Image (spheres, rainbow, N blue to C red):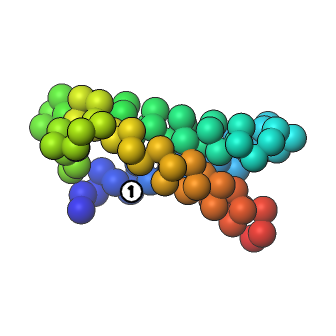
Amino acid sequence: SSLWMFPIYGTAALIGPVYRHISSLPVIARGTIYMCGIFAVEYLTGSLLNLFHLCPWDYSHAPLNINGVIRLDYAPLWFCAGLIFEWLLRRF
């Protein structure tokens, strides 16, 4: 949807180094850390892009949005996405 998404999605590469530090934690803790990290990146990049009116997403219509750049109802999705990325990194 936007060229800005390439570097934003590229931050998923941080999951590898993060996993090396948290691999001994229970899966619930790791998933929560990934979820918070994804929310943080989404919030920071969305807020920065909004300053220049370049943000390709707008969640302001959603009931559980924060400043229109993140949706708290996506928490289970980001929790699972982080664990899936972790699984893929370990597998390959």
Left or right, residue 40 beside residue 69: right
> Quadrant where the N terminus lies?
bottom left
Percent x, y of residue 35: 55, 41
Label 1 CA crowd tier, 10 Å (few <14, some 14–19, many 20+): few
Q: How many marks?
A: 1
Tell me if I can see residue 14 in this picture: no
Task: Give me the residue at 22% from left, 49% from top.
Answer: 57
- The picture quadrant where one finds residue 32 is top right
- The picture quadrant where one finds residue 50 is top left
Percent x, y of residue 53: 12, 37
Percent x, y of residue 83: 65, 55
Please state which of residues 34 and 6 is positioned toward the viewer in this rendering.
34
Q: Which amino acid type is marked by label 1?
A: Phe
Task: Give me the residue at 37% from left, 31% from top.
Answer: 44
Task: Give me the residue at 47% from left, 44% from top.
Answer: 75
Question: In the image as oriented, which residue stretches furthest toward the front?
Answer: 63
Percent x, y of residue 67: 24, 29
Tell me if I can see residue 58 in this picture: yes
Question: In the image as oriented, which residue stretches furthest toward the left?
Answer: 53
Left or right, residue 27 beside residue 77: right
> Quadrant where the C terminus lies?
bottom right
Query: Does dot 1 land on a helix, a strand or a loop?
Result: helix
Task: Give me the residue at 34% from left, 54% from top.
Answer: 5
Left or right, residue 46 beside residue 6: left
Question: In the image as oriented, which residue stretches furthest toward the right?
Answer: 24
- What residue did someone put label 1 on? 6
